[in-house]
Amino acid sequence: MENFKFYSPTQFVFGKDTERETGELLANFGAKKVFLHYGGGSIKKTGLYDRIIESLNKRDIDYVELGGAKPNPVDSLVYEGIELCRKERCDFVLAVGGGSAIDSAKAIAAGVKYDGDFWDFFDNKASIEDALPVGVVLTLPAAGSEGSVATVITKEDEGLKRGTGSDLLRPKFAVINPELTYTLPAWQTAAGVVDMMSHIFERYISKTEDVILTDRLCEATLVSIMEAARTIVKEPENYEARATICWAGTIAHNGILGVGRQEEWTTHGLEHELSALYDMTHGAGLAVLFPAYMAYTLGEDVERYYRLATKAFGVPENHYDKRAVALEGIKRLKEFFSEVGMPITMQEAGAKKEDVPKLLQTLEKNQGREFGSFMKLNLEDARRIYEMACE
Amino acid sequence: MENFKFYSPTQFVFGKDTERETGELLANFGAKKVFLHYGGGSIKKTGLYDRIIESLNKRDIDYVELGGAKPNPVDSLVYEGIELCRKERCDFVLAVGGGSAIDSAKAIAAGVKYDGDFWDFFDNKASIEDALPVGVVLTLPAAGSEGSVATVITKEDEGLKRGTGSDLLRPKFAVINPELTYTLPAWQTAAGVVDMMSHIFERYISKTEDVILTDRLCEATLVSIMEAARTIVKEPENYEARATICWAGTIAHNGILGVGRQEEWTTHGLEHELSALYDMTHGAGLAVLFPAYMAYTLGEDVERYYRLATKAFGVPENHYDKRAVALEGIKRLKEFFSEVGMPITMQEAGAKKEDVPKLLQTLEKNQGREFGSFMKLNLEDARRIYEMACE
């Protein structure tokens, strides 16, 4: 086990009707004028927007709004948000939505307090030293951004998708009402499920030994996610299953499942090129890449994949052929992704095999020629993983 | 699942040599003069005291010290601490030790900022509205006080052991170096193990349905604790096992294992009378009471105990006789307690059956005549549980 630091200061307010507490939470943090950031118009159709505004009004909290956050949130909206937020002198950024709205809200919160171009943070030219406080009303469990320090933004003209992070961007509070996720399209629910499972895989697939408690917590969460996802396919309004998915998405990325070991994140890096090139849903990209990454790196540590297969994917133990068990685990993972409606090849996800050289070009720009901690990889390895994901 | 709030703002700094970071952590929180509170002299013998002082000196942090924190920390030491802390104008309270040092440190931190008698907080006559910040260097994983809002103090002259809590008492940071626990007597290690397992039981034994993710996280932690405890009996200097116990003790009580359901805490209430009357080690008292509580309340929800037996204690499933499986689970728990050196009857723990009426008298003073949420209990039920714990 490695030394680690852990804390999770975000106040998670979880359960039915909790969005009605938004105004009170904002007031507790001293907000007077909120920059309200959301995605498409769905929050207006469902009545969520009205309930939030009512809750702000009750506490006399003023607001300015900017909709339009899209999956793979883009720099242009962040620039627009920074300008509007400055002009209106907002003192708090409230994201209503999923990872996209939260990530652009975080970038806006940091950008407002920075004199230069906010992209400097994503280009490693500057580090975040001040930011407006951020709060969240979550509508899509997936990215875990509601409890994390990270934000990922796409620079459209260069096709770059990059992340940065700071403790200053960690949401002060996150309101999570599982009922708000009843109306999510099945595709989005499933893509969210893949995203949160991937956050666990990036932590679980590690060379660090002897982190058995964290291993077991990861496995418990993976089993619960898959079970709940299967329920939701049949019963989209099953509260308990929705609640499991919502809470699992949060703890998958608030750090608790990664303590004590070196984390990976190579597959996220590979996926960012897919979603930048095709504007692909992040979860869909991960669904096609993770089984390929696992199969490619299997030989690096068969024991790790054997444990994953037996403890999380229900493959019976067989000490005489651990490799076969590990492979069966990867097969079951693909079957699960397919069962919940996710693509399992790059083509199904809308990518083309002949674009692999393009993906490698931007990958090199973003990640360099070598990456990976569980297994050291270079661009040739990446090419093979992309190609395996086409099969 | 019930609505819940969760956050865990304590900065846990975990791993080898981390006590050397104490000064830096204190400086981050603006400490200038620290009230250093610890137990017996063991921290001086082991060199821990010197390493902490060296780390304070490096950051020019002044300090005043008060040793003498004992298991079942007493009000007299808290009064002494409050006076000294005020006189010396300390601005931060640093506890070095286990739950006892931390709990009296918390009471001192709150008492310093209160004009009346600090016992008012424990008597429900006042609530904590201000407190000095608290930090921890943990030497005994057990109480989970390093990440919790709670403190439990014994009023010696009246034999009352009572708790209170406030977010203001939650430690700002907790330094946890598993190596510091190598030299703990086997008895203390085991009592700590029982304590942290009990913190999980108090959350797990609940009537709230459909909290399956939290259930699995609890079971994963229980399995890991028992496995590590068995290793430590044979290899007291096994780093990984010590690290598992240390981290499990923290997450057992920082709230993450209780989210979404009604918690219990009746057995803790029953135990407080034992440790108040006999100055019994808290973990030893819990070791004799929990199996009795479980057996007594088994009929209230056999399914719950069946799940515990099969998922945490390794009893094979048998759907035809769930009660027998559940009972076998309780038997295995007792065997485990015995294996790590804990008592399994009240007499072994130093209590007398003829004192049960006395225990019931103080129980009534502290808890009233009815208590419990999983199963509603009255004083007659409590009498039977105490008596069962004598057998």
Image (cartoon, coloured by chain):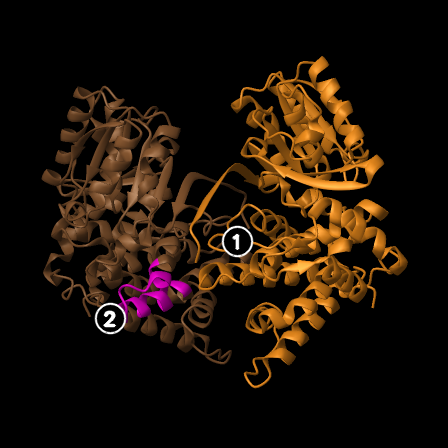
Chain colours: A orange, B brown
Q: Which mark is residue B338?
A: 2
Give the dominant element type of the magenta stretch: helix, strand or loop. helix
Q: Amino acid at mark 2?
A: Ser
User: On the picture, is A113 further left or further right than A337?
Assistant: left
Relative to B276, say whether B59 is above or below: above
Which residue is more in the foreground, B386 or A140? A140
A207 inside magenta stretch: no
Q: Which residues are magenta?
A: B224-242
Relative to B220, say whether B103 is above or below: above
Which residue is more in the foreground, B121 or A216? A216
Q: Mark 1 and mark 2 in contact (Cβ < 8 Å)?
A: no
Q: Amino acid at mark 1?
A: Leu
Q: Position of residue A14 (x, y in %)?
A: 57, 41
Q: Is residue B121 visible?
A: no
Dot 2 falls on which chain? Answer: B
Question: Of discs 2 and 1, which sits in the foreground?
Answer: 1
For the residues beneath circles 2 and 1, the answer to whether they share a chain is no
Q: Which residue is mark 1?
A: A257
Q: Position of residue B78 (x, y in %)?
A: 18, 33
The alpha-carbon separation of the residues under discs 2 and 1 comes to 32 Å
Q: Is residue B44 visible?
A: yes
Dot 1 falls on which chain? Answer: A
Residue sticking out furthest to the front: A369
Q: Residue at x 27, y 47 (%)?
A: B369
Q: Position of residue A305 (x, y in %)?
A: 60, 70
Q: Residue at x 73, y 56 (%)?
A: A286
Relative to A357, say whether A16 is above or below: above
Q: Secondary structure at mark 2?
A: helix
Q: Residue at x 70, y 61 (%)?
A: A290
Q: Quadrant of residue A301?
A: bottom right
Few, some or many C-alpha atoms within 10 Å of disc 2 (few <14, some 14-19, many ≥20)?
A: some
